[in-house]
Image: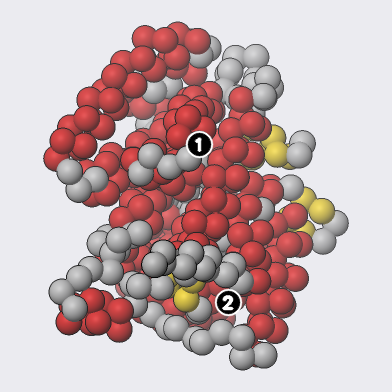
Amino acid sequence: MAEPAKKKEKISADCLLACLYLVCLPFTVVTTPIGSLLKVMTYPIVILLAVRYLMGKNELVFNYIHLFYTLYILYSVGMLLVYNDTMAMTTTKDMILGLLMLLLITLRVYNAREKKWLETAWILVGIVCIFAAITSTEVVSESENRTVVRILGFEEDQNQFCAYLIMPVLISLKRIFEKRRFFALYVLIVLLAFYAILKTGSRGGLIGVCAGVTVYIFIGMKSLKARIAIALAAVLTVLIFISVVMPMLPEDVSARYSVEAVREDGGSGRFEIWSFLLNYSAQRPERLAFGSGVFSTYPIMHSAGFRNGVAHNAYIQVLSDEGLAGLCLFLVCIVLCLVRNIKKDALYACAMISLLVFSMSLSFYVFKPYLNIMIMCATSFAGTLPQDRLTAVRNGGTVYDD
């Protein structure tokens, strides 16, 4: 007797709302009279998700990321007692909103089909970003031919733009490894994503995405033969990029990727900024322990003659603003994202590793790729909960198969 057809798992309203939020990521830079387009979309999504929880539609599932990220945000709110100018207030309010979104999306369990939908939302993010970069003909200036990327007419920072491509590239690689439908599309997404990154001239962006891809190949691939094959394919791809793609880029853009260029410009002046802020924080024990307030670096650096007001480094920014206490909470959140996913969802851990590289040149307070990747790391999927692992061990099986 033929077995009945397997019933498709349902896609919940929560999953659809989470997908909508993820897809809106590239529109962070698009401004409206009441804030960014992403923020405009965030408010109704938060309200709808909150209503569903209040109606008892979902069983709550907590993990350590929820706990420590909440503690970190509460600590940041407390820092307003130290420094509370307009930027600090706005940033802290946005951090609270980000926490609410993280909790409302990740406090429930998603089934395997919903997981695929969430990952497909990231693929759509990649397609939007690649289209914006590939079709752009605008450059920074006559003397600097780095591509200016605009989303709906609004300019995005090159480094931040590259971070949008972390998850689309990794998810595309996952589907390539699994030989999913639309195999050619995923190969094209990976290739065009790297071309888009090269066009921006972002060295941190290129290194960051490559770091995540490299770790994913050696963690995510179980077969030694597959690892060797992928490594050889990667070497071949790099050679093709060097010999074919790099010559297509403007000379000054391709020159940015040389070691000599990094050494000459001191990481675009970042080394000097880092040294100043580290020395400033170390001058007083209380400043080193608890910081000077969120984005207090603006008046500090301006008074010292810097034209910039941020550290261009997530760790030094947090250390300067929130001291060792805030930095420890910040680092615990990142470590938990890695530990929670390194076995059951290596892709998400590798995305966080990519962000660790980006963090050497960006600040993360309300950096949406950081928040959205943390959302993926904090999300619980059916079959990977502690009780599922216990059941699997008793039955002699595994719960990490996707």
Seen in the picture, residue 227 relative to 20 is either above or below; the reply is above
Rendered image quadrant of residue 72: bottom left
Secondary structure, mark 1, is loop
Q: Quadrant of the C terminus?
A: bottom left
User: Local crowd at mark 2 within 10 Å, few (<14), some, or many (≥20)?
Assistant: many
Labels in figure, total: 2
In the rendered view, does 33 fall on the left or right side of 252?
Answer: right
What label sits on residue 304 in the rendered view?
none
Q: Position of residue 267 (x, y in %)?
A: 39, 33
Q: Which residue is mark 1?
A: 182
Seen in the picture, residue 259 relative to 5 is either above or below; the reply is above
> Residue, x 59% and y 67% (percent of image)?
11
In the rendered view, does 125 fall on the left or right side of 231?
Answer: right
Q: Position of residue 211 (x, y in %)?
A: 32, 41
> Residue, x 61% and y 86% (percent of image)?
57
Q: Quadrant of the N terminus?
A: bottom left
Q: Position of residue 243 (x, y in %)?
A: 37, 9
Q: Which residue is mark 2?
A: 104
